[in-house]
Image: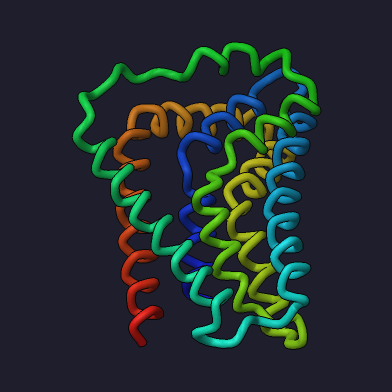
Amino acid sequence: MVLDLMVIGTAITLGPVHNSAFILLLSSPRGVRQGLAFLLSWLANLITVITLVMLLTGGQPPARHSAPSTAAIVAKLVIGLALLLYGAYRHRRPPRPHGPPRWTARIDNASPLTAAALAWLLQPWALVGAGAATALDASLSTLTDWLVLTGYCVLATLSLIVMEMYTVRAPAVANARLTALRNWLEQHQEQLVVTLSLLVGLWLTARSIYDLVA
């Protein structure tokens, strides 16, 4: 469970789309405030999903090879295969012009509520679903699993936390460097999406098949 959540959390935090949108929020007139709203909403979404899983299991993992346990593994297998197919599709798709989506032009005037809603919309729900299926094996009776789940939520939000703190601490320098980072992300977004989709998809597929036959 630990390694799976680390892989999923890392893939979530490295996603280029939400990081680009977050940098745009930080560079807006009320950037720190909007960025905080986005960050807290992002983290709250992750915590809510994990909490729902814990309520579903009662804080106790299902027995190995039971119906709920097998269903969780199959769900991760389906997500892994879907990510592989999506990555292959994006790789074969004709290249498109670089540039931010049209909706990014409205970010300057976004309210904190809009920023919070944007975090919900940009959450990579396939990966969050894989994290939820993995968290099914967590037991709230052990401190280790508590720490693992907390670490997963923090890891999946880490890029946003770092950029928010950097902007608060050194706004002028952060604005220039984060703008350069956003430009790089936009130029390499396709490669990043394909790479993350294929790597995580391969990991989830292989792990799920192993868990099913072991």
Residue that appears at 49% across and 58% down: 10
Towards the viewer: 68 or 4 = 68
The image quarter in which residue 31 lies = top right
Q: Position of residue 98 (x, y in %)?
A: 34, 20
* Colouring chosen for the image of the structure: rainbow
Relative to 189, does residue 72 appear above or below in the rendering? below
**What is the tally of numbered marks visible in this picture?**
0
* Direction front: furthest residue: 67
Relative to 122, does residue 27 appear above or below in the rendering? above
Residue that appears at 69% across and 56% down: 49
Towards the viewer: 33 or 144 = 144
Q: Position of residue 94 (x, y in %)?
A: 20, 24
Residue that appears at 55% across and 69% down: 134
The image quarter in which residue 123 lies = top right
Towards the viewer: 111 or 117 = 117
Residue that appears at 68% across and 54% down: 46
Where the C terminus falls, by quadrant? bottom left
The image quarter in which residue 67 lies = bottom right
Q: Position of residue 45 (x, y in %)?
A: 71, 48
Relative to 56, does residue 192 appear above or below in the rendering? above
